[in-house]
Image (tube, rainbow, N blue to C red):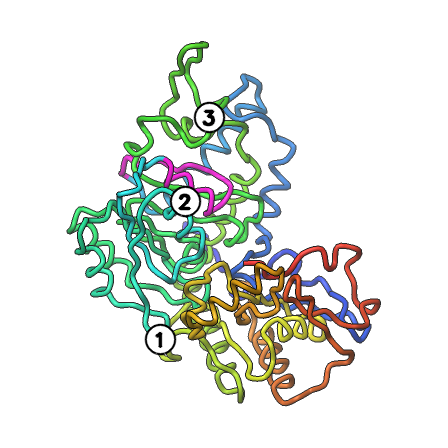
Amino acid sequence: MESEVLTVTIPTPLVGDDVPVPCLDGVERRYVNLDAAASTGALGAVRDRVHEFLPWYSSVHRGAGYKSQRATAAYEAARAACLSFAGREGRDDVAIICRNTTEAINHLAFRLGLRAEDVVATTVIEHHANLLPWRRVATCRYVECGREGTFELADVVAVLDADPRPRLLALSGASNVTGWTPPLEEIIDAAHERGVAVLVDAAQLAPHRPLPRDADYVVWSGHKMYAPFGAGVLIGPRRTFAEGDPFLAGGGAVDLVSLEEVIWSAPPEREEAGSPNLVGAVALHAALDALGDIGWEALVAHDLAVAHALRTGLARIPGVRVLGPGLDTATLPVATFTLEGVPFALLAARLSLEYAIGVRHGCFCAHPYLTRLLGFGPDEHARLRADLRRGDRSTMPGAVRASGAVNTTPADVEALLVAVREIAEGREPPVAYHQDTATGDYYPDAAAHWSIGETTRAAGCAPG
C-alpha cells in the first residue's frame, strides 16, 4: 500500500487573515499583514493543536494525576521536537524552553560565566537582543558592514584572529532589517578552527531556512514562526548548564533544598525554574510540525518569490530607496525602504490608516545597523541625543519595513506597491496628519474617524 502523500500549498493562510480593519474613509478593508518579521499570526494547525490540548492542561513535572502526566509528556515532546528541528539528534545537547529569543540570549550570557575582560565577537547588523546582553557581561568586538549592510567571511576572520581570542562569536542567522543571511556555515567553520564557540540568533532565520546544525548554541522564538503563545528556545551543549547556578532560581529546578544548601537538578530542568509555559510549548511543537509538512523546498521557493517581488517592485517606484544588498542578492522576504520627501513614520501611518496595510517602521531594534544603512553620522547622533533628552523623538532616524510570511500572496505585495506608488506620486491624504513629538508617530487630525479607543496614543508604535 502506498503511503499517503501530504500536499500543502503556499501561500498558507494564518488565523486572522480574513479580518477587516477600519480606514480613515470609513470603509473596512481586508488587513494586509506585511509585518511578519516582528510577529506572525498563528497557523491553523497551531490553533487547532492548542484548542485540542487545553482540556488536558495541567501541571508539568509536578503531579501523578493523568492530566499532569499527559501535560508533562506534551511538554517533553515539544522539547524533543525543538532538538530535532535544530538538527541535534545524536548530540548531548539540551533544549531550554523560555519566553523568547531575548530571554534565551540573556540566559546564555549569564550561564557562560563571562568576565569583563572576556571578548565576545559580534556584528553591527545585530538586533539589540544579541548586542546588549553581551555588552553587560563582557567586552564586545564588532564585525563592521559595508554600505550595503553586508560583510564577508574575511571580515569575521579578522575579528576572530585579533587578540585576545574571543570566548564566543554571537551573530544573527538573518538580519531582521534587510533579510540578508551571512554565510553561516563558513563562518562557523572558521570560528571552530580557532576554538571559538558560536551562538546563532535564529529569530529571523528559523521560519525561513534550516537552522545551522554546527552552531554551538542556537536561539529562536515561537512568535516569529506562527506560534504566538510566548515560547522561545535556547539549545546548547548539556555541559554548559551542568554546573553552577541557573539563570533563574526557584521551584522545579532543584533536587534538594535545606536552609543551608541547594542541590540543583540536572539540565534542562535546572534551567527552567517555575511553572513552564506549557501551552506555548505545545503551540511551538505544532508550528514545527506544520513547517515540516510544508517542507523547506516549498518554503524557500515562496520566500524567494516574495522577496524578489517586494524588493524589485519597490525599487522601481521613483523616490523609493531599498536598503541593504543589491537586488541580485537573495534575501528573506523582507524589504526595508524610505520614500524621498515623506517621513518614514508618516508613510507607515498612511499605509495603515488609508490602505489597511500593516508594516513596521522605526529602527527595528537594530540602531547600529540601520544608522549605518542610512549614513547617519556622528553630528546627527549628537543632535539626536540632545533631542531625546528633551523628550523629543520627532527627529529619530528610521525606515519602513515590509516583511512576508507563508500567507503572503502576490495580491498582498501588489497592494503595497500600489499604495506606495500613489503616495510617491503625491496622492493627498483624506485628512491632515500631525506628528506627536513625544513618540515620533503621526496621527490623523480627524481622530474621531479612526480610533482603537483611549489607548490609541498611549505609546509610540516604534520605540525601538
Question: Considering depth in this image, is 166 or 71 the residue closer to the camera?
Answer: 166
Q: Secondary structure at mark 3?
A: loop
Front position among marks 2 and 1: 1
Residue appearing at x 80%, y 76% in the figure: 25
C-alpha gap between disc 2 and disc 1: 28 Å
In the rendered structure, which amino acid carries the disc numbered 2? Answer: Ile
Residue at image position (75%, 55%) is 455
Q: Residue at x 42, y 42 (%)?
A: 106
Q: Is residue 308 left or right of residue 170?
A: right
Reading the image, the residue beneath label 2 is: 105
Asked if the residue at tag 1 contacts the one at tag 2, i.e. Cβ–Cβ closer than 8 Å, the answer is: no
User: Can residue 9 be spotted in the picture?
Assistant: no
For marks 3 and 2 on the same chain, the one whose residue lies earlier in the sequence = 2
Q: Secondary structure at mark 2?
A: helix
Residue 249's label in the rendered image is: 3
- Toward which corner of the image does residue 261 lie, by quadrant? top left
Q: Is residue 377 above or below residue 320?
A: above
The region drawn magenta spans 90-110
Task: Estimate the x, y position of residue 22 in percent, counting from the top left.
Answer: 77, 67
Can residue 425 be seen here? The reply is yes
Horizontal placement of 418 versus 456: left or right?
left
Q: How many marks?
A: 3
Number of other residues with Cα within 10 Å of mark 2, as a class: few under 14, some 14 to 19, many 20 or more? many
Q: Residues within 10 Å of mark 1 (few under 14, many from 20)?
A: some
